[in-house]
Amino acid sequence: MGALLSRLNPQSLRILGLLAVLVLVVLFFSTQIPHYLNGRLFNRISSSVAIMALIATGQTLVILTRNIDLSIGSIVGFVAFATGGLISSHPDLGPVLLVTYSVLLGAAFGAVNGVLVAYGRIPSIIVTLGTMALFRSALVEYSDAKSITTSNLPHWLVNFPNTVLFQIGQYQFRAAFVAAIVVVLLVHFMLNRFRPARKLYAIGSNPEAAEMAGINTSATVFVAFVLAGALAGLAGFMFLARFGTITVVAGLGLELKSVAAAVVGGVNIFGGSGSVIGALIGAVLIDLIDTSLVRWDMVSEFWREAVLGGLILLSVAADTTLMRRLVNLRISREKAKFSKARNVQSQEVAE
Amino acid sequence: MFREEKMRLFNTLGITAALMLGAAPMAFAGPVQIEGGKNVNMVLLPKFLGILVFDQANDGAQEAHKELKNPGELLFVGPTPENSVAGQIEIMTTAATQGQGAVMLSNNTGDQIVPSAKAAQAAGTRVITWDSPIPSGEGEDVFVAQVDFGSIGKVMADMAHSILGGKGQMAILSATPDASNQNAWIASLKEVLKSDPKYAGIELVDTVYGDDQAEVSYNRALGLVDKYPDLGLIMSPTTVGIQASAKAMQDEGLCDQVKVSGLGLPSEMVSYTMNGCAPEFALWDFRDLGYLTYYTAYGLASGQLTGEIGESFTAGRMGDYTIEEDPGRPGTKRILMGPFTVYTSENVEAAAK
């Protein structure tokens, strides 16, 4: 067991741990709720997690650099509304143009955050707390108290999220879910195989050392915020397609849910470690528990939030304990090896 | 009992008697005619900005403002959605320090606004609530009720009865757990279901909250369907919840099985009513609500109305109204607007335009 622990890298260990928790949660609720384990559950969770997966991925990119983006919910809301407004007035626009518009608009909002944090040297929690309110107020102003309604949207857009791409038994793989998974995997691949992307980890682990190593920290942090904005923009597009009716409250609270998904998914809030796959599983876990609690008679409406909050604390605590043990284990092994080597050396000297 | 009798007498009092505060009823005259041209600065304070129904209320208030030729200012200010509770309290406090004549409030804070509302009253600002009252009634001059809160329960029960054919399971999807208007309506629905044998076949199985957000409401609606396989109807007394539920049922192809009803905006609900997902829903006119609220607030702030129970006045194009005790909140005062419009496939398209 110890050998296995030290051979696996902490990243994979975390993901294995999360998957185990996921399975436990599913098993637990299947004993509590009748007709629980079936394709319907999978379809519910997969459709609803598609949007959060994108937002949590964006949030993870920012957290990796030892920052946070609290404006991400407002960006999702604004982009959803603006994209809805655009397609309502220009119904002939194609999917490619519309998605590009959403992503660029989101990236523009991200750039505002990025400039202020990376070049203005203002702490991200302050910047994005401000822009969260600013972007939301901009939406209130821009919306003119009108709502985007489903009836003004083209059919291809409204039907997109629930189009079944393929089906295994009862398990439907719908377009929005598949698209979100593809994006998450793409980002994961980049983070692990693409050299410039490793800078995000370097900065989060130790900003001073990264600077000394010749990494342009400002540019990298800026790019992280722009990417987070772009992903939030894409999420805004999906939000519009899924919910159809968009008002000024769209996306309210998603910023904290995305932070929760990332943290539950093992992304270190102090930056430098974590993976977007972890954040994705974190998002699935939170969504699963939330959905299941609604169907579970034991927990009343008012306790649900508290249970969710408890889960977040629990997972962070578990993560910290696990990592500390692992580090101690490694240190003691290294020490053992070192002292063995020294014993051999001193014996040689004596002889 | 005695008090109610007196109320009725007061009902018929006219301008002179109403101005003679507390005088014994002696004259028989018509309701107070609100006179225009007096300078009163007023604030219309919605739950938050950016929602169509509140904008419609503002249109109505602006109409009354012009009609009464008030040389003062009518401000439409509200918090942003993420800051609703703190923002409302702040705006109330500011209005008092600015010496506004009246604040017209759609309360989203429960009783949390009471201290600042009381301070505003002490500073000479009239506090008139509309749409959603202050639950305890403290710090509030009068509440302009869109419809009788008791009758909302009756209307919802009737819609449920007609959609379910008199028999079946129903669940409620509300806004936030501390929205005082929705909570009062749900209580009245439960009361109606219990008291009239006509509704004996309707079983209310659950109440959940969608926080007035599309995504939460959408997921809650699906959660209800999963939890209760025999569910026939989701009743949502909020414009956000009703359309999110209808969308969820449509997306999952469940409209044949589970219908949606409640309180909704025709422009947002038209497609769901036409395709049978939400065959019936109801609402009142928010423009009229804003108009009547303005007349009430203007009358009180300009000293033409005293705000006593039994006092009647004429609110421009809408006719005569009387201040009465609020049956839902004993010891507080209300003005009842009414009525409801129930929308079906017959009339929804015209209303959505």
Image (cartoon, rainbow, N blue to C red):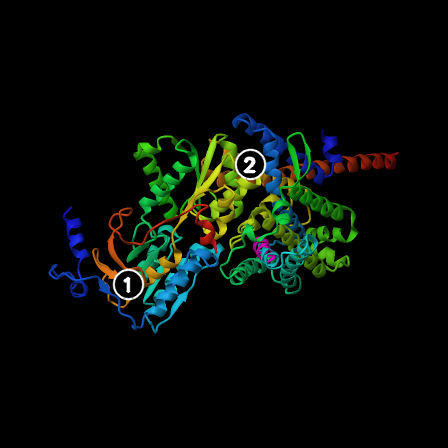
Residue A82 in the magenta stretch? The answer is yes
Residue that appears at 52% across and 28% down: A33
> From the viewer's perspective, is B245 left or right of A168?
left
Residue that appears at 53% across and 40% down: B249
The disc numbered 2 marks a residue on which chain? A
Specify the amino acid type for callout 2. Answer: Ile
Q: State which quadrant residue A221 falls in.
A: bottom right
Crowding around mark 1 (Cα neighbors within 10 Å: few <14, some 14 to 19, many 20+) is: few
- Magenta stretch: give its range: A72-83
Q: x, y percentage for residue A11?
A: 70, 40
Q: Which residue has dot 2 on it? A: A289
> From the viewer's perspective, is A223 left or right of B1?
right
Q: x, y percentage for residue A258?
A: 59, 47
The answer to whether A235 is drawn above or below residue B227 in the figure is below
The disc numbered 1 marks a residue on which chain? B
Q: Is residue B101 visible?
A: yes
Dominant secondary structure (helix, strand or loop) of the stretch shown in magenta: helix
Q: Which disc, if any, is residue A153? A: none
Residue that appears at 71% across and 29% down: A1
How many dots with numbers?
Answer: 2
Assign a secondary structure to mark 2.
Answer: helix
Q: Do labels 1 and 2 share a chain?
A: no
> From the viewer's perspective, is A208 left or right of A42?
right
Front position in the image: A233 or A190: A233
The answer to whether B114 is drawn above or below residue B256 in the figure is below
Q: Which residue has dot 1 on it? A: B122
> From the viewer's perspective, is A88 left or right of B74?
right
Specify the amino acid type for callout 1. Answer: Ala
Q: x, y percentage for residue B270?
A: 49, 49
Front position in the image: B316 or B134: B316
